[in-house]
Amino acid sequence: MSSALWATDPTRRTAHPHHLFRRTFSFPAMLACLLAMLATLTVRSRFNDTDTWWQLKTGEIIWNTHTVPTTDLFSYTTNHHAWVPHEWLSQLLIYGAYRWGGYSGLMLWLCFFSAALLVAGYTLCSLYSGNSKTAFIGALIIWLFSTTVLSIRPQLLGYLLLVFELILVQLGRTRDPRWFFGLLPLFALWVNCHGSFFLGLLVLGVFLFSSFFDLRLGLLVSSRWDLRRRRTLVWAFLLSAAALFLNPVGVKQILYPLNTLLRQRIVVSQITEWRPLQFTDPRGAALLAILGCIFLLVIVRRAELLWHELLMLIIGTILGINHQRLAVVFGLLAAPIVSRLISTTWDSYSAEKDHPVPNAVLITLAIATVIMTFPSHQDLEKQVADGNPVKAVEFIKTRHLSGHMLNAFNYGGYLIWALPEQPVFLDGRADVYEWSGVLDEFAKWATLQSDPNALLNKYDVNFCILERGSLSANVMPLLPNWKVVYFDDVSVIFVRSAK
């Protein structure tokens, strides 16, 4: 229709606002709002994470000094050991949220990016399956497995970028191959936000590898990509790999994820989130159930499983089973596959059959729920106090305790933030403490595998702040020259009375 005809057609002119209303309050938009509400309700009580605080302090240093630290600045035990700032850009964003809105700003950061992860996952599943209804099932799968990473930490941004990568690859694979070039700025950003960029390269390699095969092995199929599409992906892969060097420390930052998995033995074996996923865990049971459903759908419904999908499932399953914190990877890789396999179960979304008024009501209720359940400042402070030695820090400041401090592992991050004038013994940056040998010493001390006095004397510790009820807190009163000077429901402080 010509522009003149459009201008003289009163029906067209009056229908335009109606079309805008229908698009704004569409069924997919309503589902996206419900997912954003689900994300907010999930994280509203997750404000306190032990690693948030040292991330926040690092972001403050970067903000104020305009430099990215490459040595340890917070501990007296590592002797300023070299440190890989592999999450510096995420830390800067976290501090920016705090600087803008304090605790509420941090909570808003968490709600926004948690919602973005689920909505982006829904978009991915919708694009991949061609059915916005079954895509919602995929988004719920992503929600279930993402509960391992929904906290104020850089990993949340890392997995959001993984979803963006999968969206770009899907658009380049099924539409215009020029979408692949969006991967270049994505990886340049990703390498400075979180070490999961290495997984992104692996995923990209799987698509590239699969693009060369044209095969059918029963219900396992693969179609060779056309030359132009495959060549574009090759160039995008190579340029994305080159973009990884746009970081503060070069190749060390690129190899950091491998260092974590292959050389940080204590981190991977002792820290809870790196331990294997237990099948008594709801996510462990769900992982097995989803795998079973996928292969059952393939067999019973004679649905085809694509070669790259099989490889994705293998990667996601291996990572998810071996490390609890990587269960989210399984969810992100499996959700689009499930959405596609069940896409014929429901009719696809039709805008003509949509009901915008009920959608608008549900969207309004979702927004209202988010606003009404957003934690108050008092609630956020309570969450912090329930999990951190807030009152103990006040006691240390009031009594002017000085000298070397030994602190519980989970307290290190908060002490870095709340007591910056007092260097910590160790904190959640387990990598630098493993490299320097401190983590191994502390682990043996905390589990009574070594003489408790040996570590205290070696580092000339003057006072200890420990978790009340911990094994080490029960042993400290039995040691000579140590006495309790403070305790509450959360923590206890011991001071050396004489040498």
Image (cartoon, grey):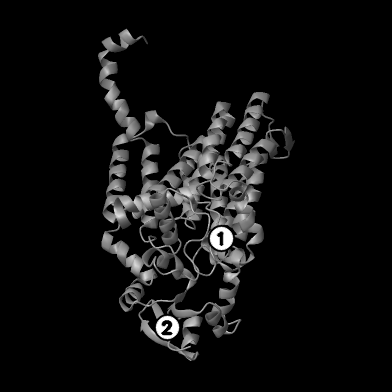
Q: Which residue is mark 1?
A: 324
Q: Which label's residue is closer to the chain start, 1 or 2?
A: 1
Q: Which residue: 53% across, 42% down?
A: 339
280 in relation to 2, above or below: below
Front residue of 290/251: it is: 251
203 in relation to 473, above or below: above
Front residue of 97/326: it is: 97
Helix, strand, or loop for circle 1? helix
Taking the image as shown, residue 171 lies to the left or right of residue 367, namely right
Q: Which quarter of the figure is the N terminus placed in?
A: top left
Check disc 2 and give the amino acid type: Phe
Residue 303 seen from this side: no
Count of all numbered marks drawn on residues in the image: 2
Answer with the quarter of the image where residue 226 lies.
Answer: top right
Q: Badge 1: how crowded within 10 Å, few (<14), some, or many (20+)? A: many
Q: Identify the mark at residue 243; answer none if there is no mark.
A: none
Q: Badge 2: how crowded within 10 Å, few (<14), some, or many (20+)? A: many
Q: Which residue: 63% across, 48% down?
A: 313
Answer with the quarter of the image where residue 453 lies.
Answer: bottom right
Answer with the quarter of the image where residue 237 lies.
Answer: top right
169 in relation to 465, above or below: above
Q: CA distance from mark 1 to mark 2?
A: 34 Å
Q: Position of residue 98 (x, y in %)?
A: 34, 53
Q: Which residue is mark 2?
A: 494
Q: Which residue: 62% across, 60% down?
A: 322
Residue 312 seen from this side: yes
Helix, strand, or loop for circle 2? strand
Q: Position of residue 395 (x, y in %)?
A: 33, 77
